[in-house]
Image: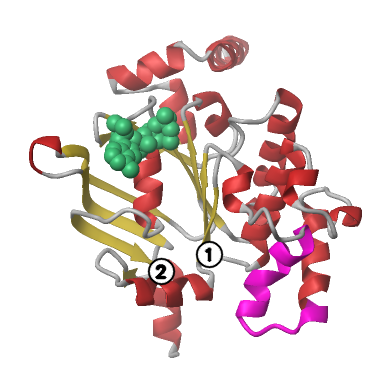
């Protein structure tokens, strides 16, 4: 690769979705869910998608992952347009491990019949890594999600919900992907585990992996995302820096979301008061 090519690959977003439309069903049962949505995620960036239930967040995630067919538009994963990919091409892409995922229910991201160790090493063995090396890497990633090695021989069913979701995050990380799509990763967890998993996700910033973090809860997303995209009635009605979306929401629907997140509202109010005070002190 020439220096120029390398530069171009470095600038290229890890995900670029352009004018995507998705519908379910046909004829009279046809339901349009996404209608001309565009969003890009830069390398290493954390982008949050928020929106009310049924707004199409999971549909967006599942379409990017090749689980739902795109009706129109382009989905560029590391520059490769996957929107019309055939199952064989998806298989090849998955094997390369560029995009990983974590779902709300960890039992859907983990094979219930595989031990934690097998779940973690599988993506590495598929890519030709030898078992001892793969197990070593699996242990390291288990440490990164703050879990003990004692869990390696266990089955997912023998773990708590919080432990399982940490394993799902470790499994997504172990292949060292460019992008991880997380669909409501903390919604099923109790508050202590929610905070724990959010802290782990925040800690991934320096590792260079990009995160697409989907949630109906603005509060969970606001503390971790660089940018936030607001999905409403099949379109992104607002996309901006997390701080701007929270502090100065432009779209009425975003204002409603910010208004109904009490902790955010009080944090924004406290910040405004501090800034007022600072301005007073300067004069
Ligand atoms: N497999 C499917 N077949 C038909 N319709 C579907 C299917 N999956 C989702 N839908 C419909 O598409 C719309 C968007 O659903 P989606 O699951 O993407 O929403 P969501 O934003 O993820 O909601 P939630 O916050 O509840 O997870 C809903 O009206 C839903 O009923
Ligand atoms: Mg959903």
Q: How far from the left and from the top, in percent, is residue 213? A: 51, 42
In the figure, 136 relative to 161: above or below? Answer: below
Neighbourhood count class around disc 2 (C-alpha, 10 Å): few under 14, some 14–19, many 20 upward = many
Please, which residue is most extreme toward the bottom here?
2
Q: Which mark is residue 102?
A: none
Residue at 74%, 66% in the rendered image: 118
Check whether the beta carbons of the residues at disc 1 and disc 2 lie within 8 A of each other: yes
- Is 124 situated left or right of 155 in this image? left
Secondary structure of the magenta portion, mostly? helix
Q: Is residue 239 visible?
A: no
* Rendered-image quarter of ligand 2: top left
Residue 125 lies in the magenta-colored region:
yes
Q: Which residue is mark 2?
A: 78
Residue placed most toward the observer, 194 or 224: 194
Dot 1: element: loop
Residue 196 appears in the figure: yes
Residue count near mark 1 (Cα–Cα under 10 Å), binned few <14, some 14–19, many ≥20? many
Judge from the rendering whether residue 248 lies leftward or rightward of residue 201; answer left or right.
left
Residue tagged by mark 1?
178
Q: Quadrant of the C terminus?
A: top right
Separation of marks 1 and 2 at Cα, in angstroms: 8 Å
Image coordinates of residue 222 in percent, x first then y, are: 54, 30
Residue 245 shown in magenta: no
Quarter of image, res 26: top left
Residue 232 % position (x, y): 29, 29
Quadrant location of residue 278? top right
Work out which quarter of the rendered image holds the N terminus and state it.
bottom left
The residue range painted magenta reads 116-133
Q: Report the number of discs.
A: 2
- Looking at marks 1 and 2 on the same chain, the residue that comes earlier in the sequence is marked by 2
Q: Position of residue 240 (x, y in %)?
A: 38, 37
**Residue occupying the point 83% across, 54% down:** 154
């Amino acid at each position: 690769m020439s220096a120029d090519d390398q530069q171009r690959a470095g600038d290229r977003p890890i995900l670029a979705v352009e004018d995507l439309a998705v519908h379910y069903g046909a004829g009279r049962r046809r339901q349009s869910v996404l209608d001309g949505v565009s969003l890009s995620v830069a390398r290493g960036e954390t982008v949050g998608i928020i929106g009310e239930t049924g707004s199409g967040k999971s549909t967006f995630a599942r379409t990017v992952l090749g689980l739902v067919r795109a009706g129109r538009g382009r989905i560029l994963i590391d520059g490769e347009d996957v929107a019309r990919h055939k199952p064989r091409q998806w298989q090849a892409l998955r094997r390369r491990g560029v995009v990983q995922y974590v779902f709300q229910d960890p039992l859907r991201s983990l094979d219930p019949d595989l031990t934690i160790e097998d779940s973690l090493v599988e993506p590495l063995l598929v890519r030709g890594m030898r078992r001892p090396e793969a197990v070593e890497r699996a242990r390291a990633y288990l440490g990164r999600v703050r879990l003990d090695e004692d869990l390696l021989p266990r089955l997912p069913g023998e773990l708590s919900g919080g432990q399982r979701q940490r394993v799902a995050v470790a499994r997504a990380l172990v292949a060292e992907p460019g992008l991880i799509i997380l669909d409501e990763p903390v919604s099923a967890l109790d508050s202590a585990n929610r905070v724990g998993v959010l802290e782990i996700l925040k800690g991934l910033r320096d590792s260079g992996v990009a995160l697409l973090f989907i949630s109906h809860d603005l509060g969970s997303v606001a503390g971790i995302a660089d940018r936030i995209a607001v999905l409403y009635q099949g379109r992104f009605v607002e996309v901006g820096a997390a701080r701007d979306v929270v502090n100065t929401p432009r779209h009425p629907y975003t204002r409603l979301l910010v208004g109904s997140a009490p902790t955010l509202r009080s944090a924004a109010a406290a910040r405004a008061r501090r800034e007022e005070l600072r301005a007073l002190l300067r004069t």
